[in-house]
Amino acid sequence: MSAATLDAEACFRASSGRDRRFDGQFVMAVRTTGIYCRPSCPARTPHRPNVEFFRTSAAAHLAGYRACKRCLPEAVPGSPEWNTREDTSARAMRLIADGVVDRDGVPALAARLGYSTRQLTRLLTEELGAGPLALARAQRAHNARYLLVSTTMPAGDIAFAAGFSSIRQFNDTLAEVFGLTPTGLRERARRADVGTDAAPGTVTVRLAAREPFDGAGVITWLATRALAGIESAADGTYSRSVRLARGAAVMTIAPEPGAVRVTARVEHLADLPSLLTRARRLVDLDSDPEAIDAALAAHPFIAPAVAARPGIRIPGAVEPTEMVVRAILGQQVSVAAGRTAVQHIVAALAEPLPEALAQAGVTHLFPAADVLAHHVYDVTGGPKARREGLVNTCAAIAAGDVALDIGATREDFTAGLEALPGIGPWTSNYVALRVLGSPDILLTGDSAVRAGAKAVGLAHDPRGLAAAAAPLAPWRSYLMMHLWSASAPSTPGVA
C-alpha cells in the first residue's frame, strides 16, 4: 500500500484506540503541535482535522514534523510489511535497515534493486513519502536513539556507530527529529529501557517485539542446531559469531517479555546497526503475531497448536552461505546428523575470531564461501555428487554468480539457487525461509512437516497437505513451524 492510499480513517481509529498492533506501521502527525506519534501514544487524541498520517517517519520528517518526546515513535518494532511484501519499496527498506546506503550509497542500493538512482528515488517517494537518502537518515536517527537509551556508550562513539559521518550531523539530526540533544534524549529515556554494558567493549541493546512473542522457542530451535565454536546456547540465551561488512562480531540474544536483549561486541563500531538488524531478523521481531495467530487458529486442527505456542516465530539466518551449506547437508537426515556433517567443516576450516571478540563457546567464524569452494570437498563425507554440488555452489556464491540478498524477491532468490546443479526446490525454499524470512513457504515434501501434519490431524501426503494449507496463505511458514514442533523427535528434520 502506498503513502497515497494509506487509509486515514482506519489509521485514526487505530490511533484513537491506542492500538499497539499498529506501532511501526504508520505514524500520526499533529499539525497544531508539529509532532508525530506512534499509534499507541498515551497523549490525548487530537481532533481529526488536525492530523495526517505517514507510512514512514522519514516522510513525517520531510513534512516538517519531529518525533514525540513522550511516546518516542522510533522505539517500536519495525513494520511487518517489509518482511511480507516483495515489492521494490519493501526490499529497499530491508536493505536500508541493513546499512546499504550508509556503506555503499544510493547508487549501490538502486543497482541491487535493478533501478537507476533517479527511478528509485521517484518510486520510494511516491510509495513511502521519502526517498532513499531521507529513509536512511531516519534509520540513522532510529539507530542512535536505541544506542543512547540502551547503552552507556559515549555520544561521540554512538554518532559513528549509528552511521553518521560527523558529530555535527549527528547533533543536528537528533535536534531536528527528536527536538532534543543526545544528552537530553538519553536523560528522558525510561529507566526500563536503559541497559548496563556487560563488559568493556560490549554494547547491550533492548529491541522491542510485538507480543505474544515466543522468543524462547526461537532460542531452543537455534540451540538444537548450534555449531560448536560458532554458536553457543546456555540458560535460555544464544550467542554466535557473525561476519559483517567491515569485520567480525559476536552477539548474545536473551529473550524477555516483549523484547530481546542483545549484547554485542563488534570489530568495527560502524557495523553495529547492521548487526542489530540481523538480530531482529534472526528472531523475527517485526512479525505481526496477532494477525498470524488469528489466521492459523481459524483452522480447527491448528488452533490447539497456536494456543499452546502463541507468537511463534521463524528463526532467521545471519550467515547466508552457512545456511546454504546446512541445507545441502541437512537434506533427508536428522537434525543431529546434519549438524554433525556441518561441524566437520567448521572444525577443519573455520576462521579464528579476533582475540578481543572471542568468548566461551564462540571462538571462530563460519568459513567464507571462497575458502569452502577450495577445501570443502576434502573435509566433507557422503556421496561424491553431493560434495561436488557443495563445491560448485560455494564457488558460485564466492564469484557473485548467486546473490543471497535480503533485497531479493523469493522467486529470484530460489531461481538463482535452483540454477545450480544439485539444488532443488526443497533446498532453495528452506534457505529462503531462513534468510529472507519468507512468510508463506510450506515444504510439503519434508518428512518432518508431514509427520507434524499427521500429528495434528491434517492430510499428510504432499498434495493433500498443500490443499489443506491453502486457506492459511500467506502465513504457511508459521504453520510449518507449528508442524515441525508437532513432529516426533526422531523424525528426520531440517538444518
Image (spheres, rainbow, N blue to C red):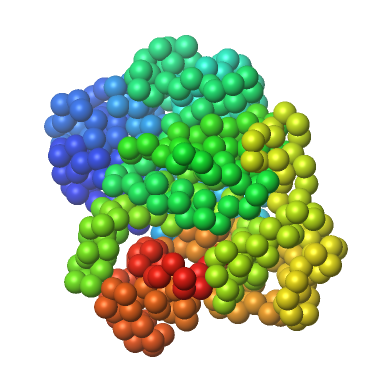
Vertical placement of 486 versus 88: above or below? below
Task: Name, please, the residue furthest toward the front.
Answer: 490
Nearer the observer, 89 or 478: 478
Asked if one can make out residue 181 in the rendered structure from this viewpoint, the answer is: no
Nearer the observer, 279 or 274: 279
Vertical placement of 241 versus 341: above or below? above
Q: How many marks?
A: 0
Residue located at (33% from left, 47% from top): 213
Residue located at (40% from left, 12% from top): 187
The x, y position of residue 364, in whole percent, is 72, 44
Asked if one can make out residue 252 in the rendered structure from this viewpoint, the answer is: yes
- Quadrant of the rendered image containing residue 398: bottom right
Q: Is 234 displayed left or right of 474 in the figure?
A: right
Q: Is 32 displayed left or right of 78 in the figure?
A: left
Which quadrant: the N terminus? bottom left
Nearer the observer, 331 or 123: 331
The x, y position of residue 271, in whole percent, is 64, 36
Which quadrant: the C terminus? bottom right
The x, y position of residue 323, in whole percent, is 61, 60
Residue located at (26% from left, 60% from top): 306
Residue located at (33% from left, 39% from top): 258
- Quadrant of the rendered image containing residue 455: bottom left
Vertical placement of 221 versus 61: above or below? below
Nearer the observer, 293 or 106: 293
The x, y position of residue 178, in whole percent, is 40, 22
